[in-house]
Image: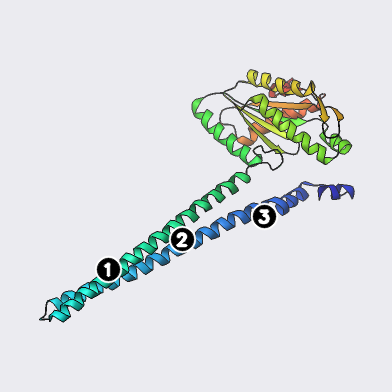
């Protein structure tokens, strides 16, 4: 759809981007969650029905016992006594069989609930994962960043944020096509994840922009990590193995911010984002920190 719009030279606005997302992605998540809700509503309704039935049977049993006690207080024959015993045994068997059936049904419903739980967890996970790269998406990034901020605020420790953007990626897509561009995005995601070696949180925040949350890391340490990432791409030549075609060098620019006490999530991210654009506006293929903005 995006390719078609670009071919028609349509203006690609933020509003159009939102509509495309809602059309192709958000409805899918809502549908999956709705299916889970519907399934759970059905199970709960079934449980209530079984309990009501069980309640009705116990009432019948109580009625039989009450009636039997009344008759036993009177002068009755052997035949009548036998009928009372048979009635009690019959009602007891009904409850026993009902309990067996209920146990079987509850066992089935337990399995259904477990399946719903798995589907719900999967739907929640998919809603937080970037479908192309497999990295956590913007929503997951913001959730983790908030939790890290809350944690270091109480522990009084360092927290830094890297915002990474691929230089001239639109030109690269125009030259080699979106399919190759998608493969490059996967490569960049895997390379960044490898370079931080799982110690820190990596996410794709949209387009060609990635973020890294560095816990317990001062600004000086974050600069070392960022420079390592930048140099790794600048010193590597890309090659399309399926076509044996050299794609040249793809560089990245990186902005860094260090968390300030009582700062909002938005303010923390915006300072890293401003540092990123400073890096881009001063030549690209470089690392910039919030301190560089004041120079």
Determine which quarter of the picture holds residue 60.
bottom left
Answer whether residue 11 is visible to the viewer in this image. no
Q: For this rendering, which residue is in front, 186 or 240?
A: 240
Density class for disc 1 (Cα within 10 Å; few <14, some 14-19, many ≥20) is some
Q: For this rendering, which residue is in front, 206 or 28?
A: 28
Residue 268 % position (x, y): 64, 31
Determine which quarter of the picture holds residue 149.
top right
Q: Name the residue under label 2.
A: 44
Q: What element carries label 1?
A: helix
Left or right for 191, reference 176: left
Q: For this rendering, which residue is in front, 140 or 196?
A: 196
Residue 22 % position (x, y): 70, 52
Answer whether residue 245 is visible to the viewer in this image. yes
Q: Name the residue under label 1.
A: 92
Find the distance from the CA under tag 2 to the CA under tag 1: 27 Å
- Marks 1 and 2: in contact by CB < 8 Å? no
Q: Name the residue under label 3.
A: 27
Q: Residue 210 carries which label?
A: none
Residue in the image at 75% along x and 20% along y = 231
Determine which quarter of the picture holds residue 64.
bottom left
Please identify, in this view, whether the residue under mark 2 or under mark 1 is nearer the observer.
1
Residue in the image at 72% along x and 52% along y = 24
Q: In this view, does 98 lie above or below 269?
A: below
């Amino acid at each position: 759809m995006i390719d078609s719009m670009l071919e028609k030279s349509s203006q690609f606005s933020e509003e159009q981007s939102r509509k495309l997302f809602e059309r192709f992605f958000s409805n899918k998540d809502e549908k999956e969650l709705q299916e889970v809700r519907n399934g759970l509503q059905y199970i709960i309704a079934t449980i209530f029905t079984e309990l009501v039935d069980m309640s009705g049977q116990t009432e019948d049993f109580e009625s039989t016992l009450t009636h039997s006690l009344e008759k036993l207080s009177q002068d009755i024959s052997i035949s009548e006594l036998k009928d009372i015993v048979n009635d009690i045994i019959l009602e007891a068997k009904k409850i026993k069989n009902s309990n067996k059936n209920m146990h079987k049904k509850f066992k089935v419903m337990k399995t259904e609930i477990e399946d719903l739980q798995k589907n719900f967890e999967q739907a929640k996970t998919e809603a937080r994962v970037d479908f192309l790269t497999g990295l956590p998406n913007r929503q997951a990034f913001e959730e983790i960043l908030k939790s890290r901020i809350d944690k270091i605020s109480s522990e009084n420790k360092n927290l830094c944020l890297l915002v990474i953007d691929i230089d001239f990626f639109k030109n690269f897509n125009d030259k080699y096509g979106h399919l190759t561009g998608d493969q490059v995005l996967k490569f960049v995601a895997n390379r960044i994840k490898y370079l931080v070696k799982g110690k820190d949180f990596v996410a794709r925040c949209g387009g060609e922009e990635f973020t890294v949350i560095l816990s317990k890391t001062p600004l000086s340490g974050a600069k070392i990590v960022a420079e390592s990432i930048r140099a790794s791409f600048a010193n590597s030549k890309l090659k399309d193995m399926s076509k044996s075609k050299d794609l040249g060098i793809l560089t990245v620019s990186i902005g860094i911010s260090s968390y300030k006490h009582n700062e909002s999530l938005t303010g923390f991210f915006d300072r890293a984002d401003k540092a990123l654009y400073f890096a881009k506006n001063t030549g690209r293929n470089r690392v910039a920190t919030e301190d560089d903005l004041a120079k």
